[in-house]
C-alpha cells in the first residue's frame, strides 16, 4: 500500500465539520467586535524578525518563531503574534488616522511549540485593540469586549473567569521589597513561571534569580493577597466600569497574572477555565510604548488575543458547540426523479436559492431512497420532490426529514412554505 503523506506537525486539516466551527467563531467575533465599534483589519503573514526582536521577548523570538532568510538575506518570520504588526501599521499612517483607533482581526499565526491539547503550531487568533487613549476605562472596555464574547457563545462566569492585574501596581510593590528598578523585569519573569514549575523548583528559580529568602517569602505573600487591587487607582476605576456594565461577575483580581510579553506596561488580564484546567483561553493588556518602539510617535494602546484552539476546547467541554455541527440543518435538498426531470429539478433549486434558501440539487438521476439517505447522512432538514404528478400540476412535495412530515404545495409557494416550516 502507498504511504500517505502526512500533514506538517502541529498543523490542522479543517474538514467541513471543523471549518463550520471556525466560521461560527469568526461570525461571533465579528458580531461582538462590531457591536463595540471596532473595525476589521489584517496584516501580512510574513514580517521581518527585527519587528519582534525589540519587545516581544527572547523566548518568542529565539525559540518559538519560524525564521528563515529570504533571497535578499533578510531574516523573515511567519508571524507569531499581531500586536507588533498593528503597531507598525499604526506608525506608518499615524498622521492620517483618527484616534482612538479600535481595530480587530482574525487570522492564522505560527509558533514553534510542542503540540499538545489546546496548543498547536499553526492556529487562528482573534486580536482586538484600542490605541490612542490612556485610561483604565479603555482597559475595561477591552475586557468588556472579551466578556461579551464569552456571554454570546453561552459561557457563564461559573465556567470561565477573566483574571486581572496591573504591572505598574506590581512594579511598585516589588520595589517595596527592596528590588532595584533594573531587576524588577526579572521578577515579572519569576511570577510568570510560577504555574509552570513545581513549588520547590519555582523557589529554587527565584533564589537563583537573585531574590533573598526574605524577599521570596514577601513575594509569596503578595501573590496571595487578593485585595492588592484596592491600592491601585487604575484598578479601582477599571472594576467600577465593568460593574456599571454588569460584566464584573466575569472578572477577578489575581496578582499572579503578569503576562510573559515584555511590552506590557499596565493592566494585564487572562481568560481561563474557572475550574483551573488548561492554558489561558485569551490574554492581553496595556502597551504604552510599542508604537514608539517600531518608529512611530509614542502612543498608548491596550489589546488582547484569543486563539481558536483553547476556546474550542473550552466550548466543547461545556457543551456550547456541537462537534458534529448543525451546518446542514436549514439546507434544502432538491431531488431528481428521473433523467427527463433533471432540468426542472435544477430550475427549482435555482428558484429556491434566489429566494434566499441554502439549496443542494442532487447531481444525477438516482433512486429516491438513495437521495434521501444522502440527505439523512448529511443532516439536511428538507427535501423537495417533483415527480410526474407534481410536474403536471406545477407543484412540489416538501418533506421535513427531521419531523417525518410532508406536504404538497404549488411551486410558487415552495420557498415561503419551507421558510415557515423552518420556524
Image (cartoon, grey):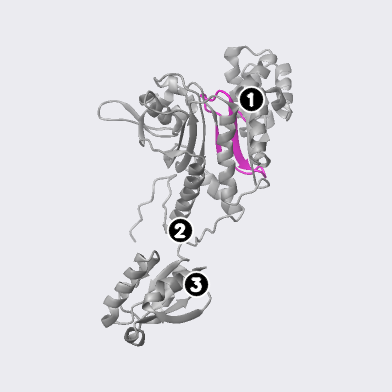
Earlier along the polypeptide chain: callout 1 or callout 3? Answer: 1
Locate the N terminus by quadrant: bottom left
Q: Is residue 115 visible?
A: no
Residue 177 inside the magenta-drawn segment? no
Question: Disc 3 designates what residue?
Answer: 421
Earlier along the polypeptide chain: callout 2 or callout 1? Answer: 2
- For the residues carrying marks 3 and 2, which lies nearer the camera in this image? 3
Rendered image quadrant of residue 237: top right
Residue 52 rendering spot, x and y as whole percentages: 42, 26
Residue 423 rendering spot, x and y as whole percentages: 52, 68
Q: What residue is rendered at 47% in x and 22% in y?
A: 299
| Residue 113 placement, left or right of 350 | right
- For the residues carrying marks 2 and 1, which lies nearer the camera in this image? 1
Residue 270 inside the magenta-drawn segment? yes
Instruction: Write the start and end of the magenta stretch as one range.
Output: 257-284
Q: CA distance from mark 1 to mark 3?
A: 54 Å
Vertical comparison of 63 with 186: above or below: below
- For the residues carrying marks 1 and 3, which lies nearer the camera in this image? 3
- Under circle 2, the secondary element is helix
Mark 2 neighbour density, 10 Å: few (under 14) some (14–19) many (20 or more): some
Number of the label disc, if any, that sits on residue 17:
2
Residue 321 rendering spot, x and y as whole percentages: 55, 56
Q: Tell me which secondary structure the magenta stretch mostly adopts.
A: loop
Task: Tell me whether the residue at label 1 lies in contact with that at label 3, contact meaning CB atoms closer than 8 angstroms.
Answer: no
Q: CA distance from mark 3 to mark 2?
A: 25 Å
Q: Is 79 in front, or is 148?
A: 148
Earlier along the polypeptide chain: callout 3 or callout 2? Answer: 2
Q: What residue is rendered at 73% in x and 17% in y?
A: 214
Amino acid at each position: 500500500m502507498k504511504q500517505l503523506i502526512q500533514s506538517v506537525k502541529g498543523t490542522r486539516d479543517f474538514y467541513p465539520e471543523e471549518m463550520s466551527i471556525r466560521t461560527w467563531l469568526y461570525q461571533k467575533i465579528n458580531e461582538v467586535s462590531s457591536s463595540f465599534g471596532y473595525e476589521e483589519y489584517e496584516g501580512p503573514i510574513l514580517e521581518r524578525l527585527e519587528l519582534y526582536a525589540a519587545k516581544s521577548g527572547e523566548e518568542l523570538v529565539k525559540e518559538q518563531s519560524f525564521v528563515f532568510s529570504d533571497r535578499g538575506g533578510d531574516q523573515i518570520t511567519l508571524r507569531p503574534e499581531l500586536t507588533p504588526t498593528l503597531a507598525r501599521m499604526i506608525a506608518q499612517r499615524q498622521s492620517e488616522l483618527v484616534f482612538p483607533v479600535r481595530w480587530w482581526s482574525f487570522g492564522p499565526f505560527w509558533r514553534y511549540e510542542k503540540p499538545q491539547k489546546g496548543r498547536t503550531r499553526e492556529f487562528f487568533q482573534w486580536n482586538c485593540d484600542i490605541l490612542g487613549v490612556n485610561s483604565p476605562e479603555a482597559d475595561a472596555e477591552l475586557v468588556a469586549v472579551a466578556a461579551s464574547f464569552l456571554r454570546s457563545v453561552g459561557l457563564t462566569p461559573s465556567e470561565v473567569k477573566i483574571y486581572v492585574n496591573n504591572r505598574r501596581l506590581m512594579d511598585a510593590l516589588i520595589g517595596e521589597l527592596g528590588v532595584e528598578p533594573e531587576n524588577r523585569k526579572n521578577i515579572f519573569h519569576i511570577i510568570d513561571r510560577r504555574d509552570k514549575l513545581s513549588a520547590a523548583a519555582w523557589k529554587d528559580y527565584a533564589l537563583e534569580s537573585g531574590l533573598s529568602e526574605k524577599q521570596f517569602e514577601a513575594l509569596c505573600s503578595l501573590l496571595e493577597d487578593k485585595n492588592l487591587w484596592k491600592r491601585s487607582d487604575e484598578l479601582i476605576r477599571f472594576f467600577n466600569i465593568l460593574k456599571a456594565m454588569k460584566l464584573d461577575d466575569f472578572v477577578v483580581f489575581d496578582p499572579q497574572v503578569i503576562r510573559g510579553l515584555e511590552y506590557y506596561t499596565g493592566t494585564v488580564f487572562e481568560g481561563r477555565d474557572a475550574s483551573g484546567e488548561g492554558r489561558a483561553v485569551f490574554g492581553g493588556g496595556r502597551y504604552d510604548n510599542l508604537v514608539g518602539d517600531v518608529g512611530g510617535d509614542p502612543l498608548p494602546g491596550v489589546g488582547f488575543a484569543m486563539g481558536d484552539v483553547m476556546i474550542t476546547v473550552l466550548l466543547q467541554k461545556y457543551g456550547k458547540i456541537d462537534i458534529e455541527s448543525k451546518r446542514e440543518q436549514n439546507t434544502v435538498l432538491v431531488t431528481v426523479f428521473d433523467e427527463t426531470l433533471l432540468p426542472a429539478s435544477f430550475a427549482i433549486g435555482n428558484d429556491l436559492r434566489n429566494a434566499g434558501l441554502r439549496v443542494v440539487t442532487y447531481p444525477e438521476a438516482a433512486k429516491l431512497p438513495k437521495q434521501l439517505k444522502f440527505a439523512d447522512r448529511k443532516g439536511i432538514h428538507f427535501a423537495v420532490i417533483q415527480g410526474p404528478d407534481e410536474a403536471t400540476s406545477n407543484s412540489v412535495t416538501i418533506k421535513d426529514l427531521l419531523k417525518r412530515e410532508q406536504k404538497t404545495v404549488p411551486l410558487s409557494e415552495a420557498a415561503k412554505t419551507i421558510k415557515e416550516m423552518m420556524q
